[in-house]
Amino acid sequence: MGVWKRRRKLWQKFRFLLLQDGYARADYLRKHEVLKGIGENVYFYSRIFPADPKLVMLHNNISIATNVRFITHDRIDIVLSGMYPDTKFRKRYESIEVMDNVFIGADVIILPGVRIGPNAIVGAGAVVTKDVPEGSIAGGNPAVVIGEFDQLVEKRLKHPRPSGKEEKVWKKFDKKHKKKSGKKKGKKKQKKQKKEGSEDVSGS
């Protein structure tokens, strides 16, 4: 990479970091043609600038949360060159593509050669090593399918505007966990009754 290209890339990174809003960052990436391509209604909240931006393609209606990393190359060539000095190894590059209607949670790492979606969710903290299929929810390290996109959409459509007030959020939280603890107590009671019943039968 030439000196001017390096300086331009550094300037782009600096400008990108200064932007406070996810939509503003996406607009900057689009306006300056930083990525291979970027569609409409993209929210790019992550401040981590892709190392090889022209190898990242974003389609439409995408939300990218904080600290998401797009990794499009590796440096195993350094290790291999040390092991085999007579052979010249090079960096390995691969593209990343995010299709329509995708949410990528906080701290996700996307490795080279991955396609996500369409209609997909990647849970926070996941490490995506393989394609995320259409209509799925993926999570974990390495990321695997843990749910269905349509099920989450159906659930959210029932309550599209939940309250953001702290008191109401905590009230909902307490209600949810009381319900869970009630179920656990009920199961324990059933087990106890079954055990007592089996003891009665065996003792008769």
Image (cartoon, rainbow, N blue to C red):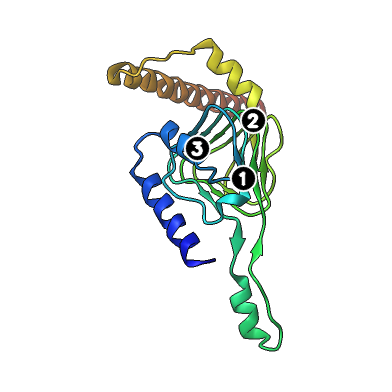
Q: Amino acid at mark 1?
A: Lys
Closer-to-camera residue (44/12): 12
Q: Which mark is residue 100?
A: 2
Q: Is residue 59 visible?
A: yes
Find the distance from the CA under tag 1 to the CA under tag 3: 12 Å
Position in image of residue 46 (x %, y %): 44, 43
In the displayed structure, does residue 22 sit left or right of residue 59? left
Q: Nearer the viewer, mark 2 or mark 3?
A: 3
Q: Please provide percent x and percent y for residue 201.
A: 66, 25
Which residue: 37% across, 15% down? 163
Of helix, strand and loop, which one carries label 1?
loop
- The answer to whether residue 142 is seen in the rendering is no
> Element at badge 2?
loop
Q: Secondary structure at mark 3?
A: helix
Q: CA distance from mark 2 to mark 1?
A: 15 Å
Considering every residue shown, the one lying at the far front of the view is 4
Q: Which residue is nearer to you in this view: 193 or 134? A: 134
Say which label, 2 or 3, has the lower sequence index.
3
Crowd class of label 1 (few under 14; some 14 to 19; many from 20; radius 10 Å) = some
Examine the rendered structure and indicate whether residue 159 appears above or below residue 66. above
Q: Answer above or below: position of 60 versus 71.
A: above
Q: Which residue is mark 3?
A: 31
Residue 182: x and y in percent read 45, 21
Q: Residue furthest bottom?
A: 86
Q: Is residue 199 left or right of residue 181?
A: right
* Residue at 46% in and 50% down: 49
Residue under the image location 61 percent in, 84 percent down: 82
From the image, tell me which residue sits under label 1.
Answer: 36
User: Could you tell me how far apart the alpha carbons at marks 2 and 3 are, in whole angstroms?
Assistant: 20 Å
Mark 2 or mark 1, which has the lower sequence index? 1
